[in-house]
Image: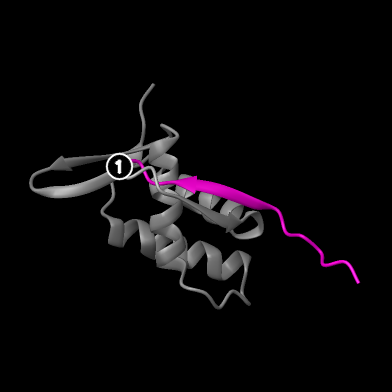
Amino acid sequence: MAKATKRKTVTTHPETKRQMKVDAAIYEPVKAAILQSLKGSKGKTFTELSDDVVKIIRKKMPGFKRSIPWYTISIRLDLETRGIVETFVEKGKKLNRLKKD
Protein backbone atom coordinates (compact mmCIF):
# COMPACT_ATOMS: atom_id res chain seq x y z
CA MET A 1 0.00 0.00 0.00
CA ALA A 2 1.48 3.37 -1.04
CA LYS A 3 1.96 5.95 1.67
CA ALA A 4 0.44 9.38 0.93
CA THR A 5 3.13 12.04 0.83
CA LYS A 6 2.52 15.40 2.39
CA ARG A 7 3.82 18.51 0.74
CA LYS A 8 6.68 20.05 2.74
CA THR A 9 8.09 23.57 2.75
CA VAL A 10 11.79 23.98 3.50
CA THR A 11 12.47 26.68 6.08
CA THR A 12 15.90 28.26 6.55
CA HIS A 13 17.34 30.01 9.61
CA PRO A 14 18.78 33.43 8.60
CA GLU A 15 22.01 33.10 10.60
CA THR A 16 22.85 29.40 10.77
CA LYS A 17 21.33 28.56 7.34
CA ARG A 18 20.03 25.37 8.98
CA GLN A 19 17.12 23.96 7.01
CA MET A 20 14.07 22.19 8.29
CA LYS A 21 10.99 20.79 6.56
CA VAL A 22 7.56 21.93 7.73
CA ASP A 23 4.28 20.49 6.49
CA ALA A 24 2.88 22.98 3.94
CA ALA A 25 -0.59 22.60 5.50
CA ILE A 26 0.88 24.20 8.65
CA TYR A 27 3.42 26.57 7.02
CA GLU A 28 0.93 28.45 4.84
CA PRO A 29 -1.68 29.33 7.53
CA VAL A 30 1.02 30.32 10.06
CA LYS A 31 2.81 32.44 7.42
CA ALA A 32 -0.51 34.15 6.56
CA ALA A 33 -1.19 34.77 10.27
CA ILE A 34 2.28 36.32 10.75
CA LEU A 35 1.83 38.60 7.74
CA GLN A 36 -1.68 39.54 8.88
CA SER A 37 -0.41 40.39 12.36
CA LEU A 38 2.51 42.51 11.12
CA LYS A 39 0.57 44.30 8.36
CA GLY A 40 0.28 47.99 9.26
CA SER A 41 2.37 47.51 12.41
CA LYS A 42 5.44 49.64 13.14
CA GLY A 43 6.89 46.70 15.04
CA LYS A 44 5.83 43.94 17.41
CA THR A 45 7.72 41.98 20.03
CA PHE A 46 7.83 38.23 19.52
CA THR A 47 5.34 37.80 22.38
CA GLU A 48 2.85 40.20 20.76
CA LEU A 49 3.32 38.52 17.38
CA SER A 50 2.99 35.04 18.86
CA ASP A 51 -0.18 35.98 20.78
CA ASP A 52 -1.74 37.32 17.56
CA VAL A 53 -0.79 34.20 15.59
CA VAL A 54 -2.21 31.92 18.32
CA LYS A 55 -5.57 33.77 18.15
CA ILE A 56 -5.68 33.64 14.34
CA ILE A 57 -4.69 29.94 14.10
CA ARG A 58 -7.17 28.92 16.84
CA LYS A 59 -9.96 30.48 14.72
CA LYS A 60 -8.79 29.02 11.38
CA MET A 61 -7.67 25.60 12.67
CA PRO A 62 -9.56 24.86 15.92
CA GLY A 63 -8.29 21.27 16.07
CA PHE A 64 -4.60 22.27 15.88
CA LYS A 65 -2.83 20.72 18.89
CA ARG A 66 0.83 21.52 18.21
CA SER A 67 2.90 24.41 19.60
CA ILE A 68 1.83 27.51 17.68
CA PRO A 69 4.65 29.68 19.19
CA TRP A 70 7.24 27.13 17.98
CA TYR A 71 5.88 27.25 14.43
CA THR A 72 5.64 31.05 14.68
CA ILE A 73 9.36 31.47 15.47
CA SER A 74 10.46 28.88 12.90
CA ILE A 75 8.38 30.39 10.10
CA ARG A 76 9.19 34.00 11.13
CA LEU A 77 12.90 33.18 10.86
CA ASP A 78 12.28 31.69 7.41
CA LEU A 79 10.40 34.84 6.35
CA GLU A 80 13.39 36.85 7.57
CA THR A 81 15.69 34.70 5.41
CA ARG A 82 13.40 35.33 2.42
CA GLY A 83 13.50 39.11 3.03
CA ILE A 84 9.81 39.47 3.92
CA VAL A 85 10.14 40.19 7.64
CA GLU A 86 12.90 42.02 9.49
CA THR A 87 13.99 42.23 13.11
CA PHE A 88 15.22 45.50 14.57
CA VAL A 89 15.93 47.02 17.98
CA GLU A 90 14.14 50.13 19.20
CA LYS A 91 14.41 51.52 22.75
CA GLY A 92 16.08 48.30 23.86
CA LYS A 93 13.27 46.08 22.52
CA LYS A 94 13.72 43.54 19.76
CA LEU A 95 10.84 44.05 17.31
CA ASN A 96 9.55 42.41 14.13
CA ARG A 97 7.94 44.11 11.13
CA LEU A 98 7.34 43.61 7.44
CA LYS A 99 10.43 44.61 5.51
CA LYS A 100 10.19 47.92 3.71
CA ASP A 101 10.92 47.91 0.00
**Tag 1 residue:** 15
What residue span does the magenta drawing correspond to? 1-15
Q: Nearer the viewer, residue 74 or 61?
A: 74
Residue found farthest to the right: 1
Hey, what amino acid is under mark 1? Glu
The one nearer the camera, 79 or 98, is 79
Residue 23 magenta-highlighted: no
Q: Residue at x 43, y 58 (%)?
A: 72
Residue at horizontal 46 percent and vertical 68 percent from the top: 68
- Decide: is 24 above or below 57: above
Residue count near mark 1 (Cα–Cα under 10 Å), binned few <14, some 14–19, many ≥20? few
Helix, strand or loop: magenta stretch: loop
Q: Furthest-top residue in view?
A: 101
Position of 34 relative to 4 (above/below) = above
User: Quick check: can you spot residue 37?
Assistant: no
Residue 8 magenta-highlighted: yes
69 or 97: which is nearer to us? 69
